[in-house]
Amino acid sequence: MATTTLKYNETTNYIAGKPEANGQQRMDVRSPLDGTLISTVVLSTANDLDKAVKAAEAAFPAWSGTPIKERAQIFYRYRELLLKNREELALLVHTENGKTMEESYAEVDKSVELTEFACSLPQLVQGELLEVSKGVECRIERKPLGVVASIAPFNFPNMVPHWTIPNALMLGNTMVFKPSEIVPISSTRIAELLKEAGLPDGVFNVVNGDRAIVEAISDHPGIKAVSFVGSTKVAKIVYARATSTLKRAVCLGGAKNHLIVLPDAHLEMTASNVVASMSGCAGQRCMAAAQMVGVGGVEPIIQQMIVEAKKLVPGKNLGPVISKVAYERITGYIAEAEKAGAKVLLDGRNPQVEGGAKDGYYLGPTIIDHVTTDMRIAQEEVFGPVISIVRAKDLDAAIAIENANPYGNAAAVFTQSGGLARQVMERASAGMIGVNIGVPVPREPFSFGGWNDSKFGTCDITGKSSIEFWTQMKKTTTKWNPEGKTNWMS
Ligand code: NAD
């Protein structure tokens, strides 16, 4: 099909400050809102990656030699451009990912916050200096690594790129970025806006593609560090492959977040929080509530959850899931659980869609009770607007259920008791804990990252922890007193 008929131009690579597309294979980009073809995306080869790495290598000396406060000026301008283009960027997220406009605006707003944190980095990376003996000083500086890479998933086309781009570049690195081939368009706009803000050519490059390009990134000898966000299966592959070629890597994987609900929890607040967590972005968030562990008499809360969930109308305030494949995977989990004896309290399959957008991949909120821990729906990541409810006889049993799942992104507890909440804070096996909050995302300057099968690598991906990941320490010892005593250490 001729690209001129598409809503968005062909999505090409962006190398050394300009679009670049040479004879690669193409893939269709479809909107989950109605299944229409909105763009095509180039599937790059290792040669294309090589060009991007060369551009990033060429840009590195001047960029890393630019004082950090000057680099910050570009990101202050970039922040203004995010705000100026907020509506267009949100519409792009809505169109390529399918989430609602409200959710898309929130995503862009989070990108602004991430950029603001990056602008504060000059205050956080001053280094250290100490006179260790008379006239002898040791100092530590944080230096960039060189060319780094960042690989993203489909579920946050605007925000997840901002987890890495502003911090890595502010700290003096140059980057090759690989968006999800399912939602590649937002990243081109990010590259254009960075250029408009004054970022020198080659500092930020976008290489589009699928598995082949991720493998090429993992192997490329010119890339010093790789960050990855996506499913656990791929996170493990990328972590193993990138570190086997001696790169540093942080790879964030999937999730199965457990929300422990105690009978003393606030009825309305708990129900609305749990439903918002399970259904926001159509459940396609690594911080989404996937499994509720009900302890004791939580029936009134479950009934209120049904009331809350019924307020969500597909096509109005609930977006579609990303693809037909995703729809079938999710409904497959529901059917299997039902067959195994679980009770579907609210069924989102084949929903009525507001406005009649029947070709989109819509699924209403689905609440499934009496799930048992041996069912596949209790163990695996479903990634849709679905919550399963398992029952536990007491808090110890509930925590044991949370601990037994292999993931560890987030866990939450809903209760009015500080003492019981404290137990979950201490004993849940997850990197991000919520107390009476369903989506416990740490805000800047705190860092984002899970435990267990939800993250491979030592640092977190955002916040202060990311400074450690994107830099290396240079330690210098100076002595300017020739008359000073010399001993075995000098
Ligand atoms: P995905 O793993 O399928 O894809 C992520 C990236 O890896 C994409 O850029 C894709 O092109 C590439 N890729 C896919 N298969 C590959 C393979 N076999 N080898 C090498 N590269 C490959 O993930 P997705 O479906 O795009 O995103 C959803 C997943 O991401 C969910 O599991 C979700 O929980 C997870 N996620 C995690 C976090 C977090 O912070 N932990 C945040 C967002 C999303």
Image (cartoon, helix red, strand yellow):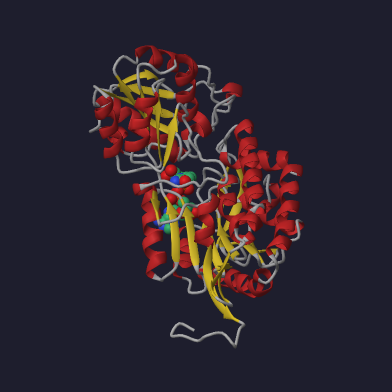
Q: How many marks?
A: 0
- Residue 41: image x %, image y %? 59, 55
- Residue 59: image x %, image y %? 66, 71
Please name the residue shown 71% across and 48% down the image. Answer: 79
Q: Quadrant of residue 395?
A: top left
* 212 versus 153 height, above or below: below
Residue 415 versus residue 59: which sits nearer the camera?
A: 415
* 412 versus 226 height, above or below: above
Residue 488 versus residue 225: which sits nearer the camera?
A: 488
Please name the residue shown 61% across and 84% down the image. Answer: 481
Q: Is residue 453 visible?
A: yes
- Left or right? Give the position of 486 relative to 391: right
Please name the residue shown 75% across and 48% down the image. Answer: 81
- Left or right? Give the position of 188 relative to 449: right
* 37 versus 421 height, above or below: below
* 160 versus 367 height, above or below: below
- Left or right? Give the position of 152 relative to 124: left
- Residue 127: image x %, image y %? 58, 64
- Residue 108: image x %, image y %? 64, 41
Please name the residue shown 68% across and 63% down the image. Answer: 68
- Left or right? Give the position of 332 relative to 312: left
Residue 276 versus residue 131: which sits nearer the camera?
A: 131
Q: Quadrant of residue 7?
A: top right
Q: Is residue 362 visible?
A: no
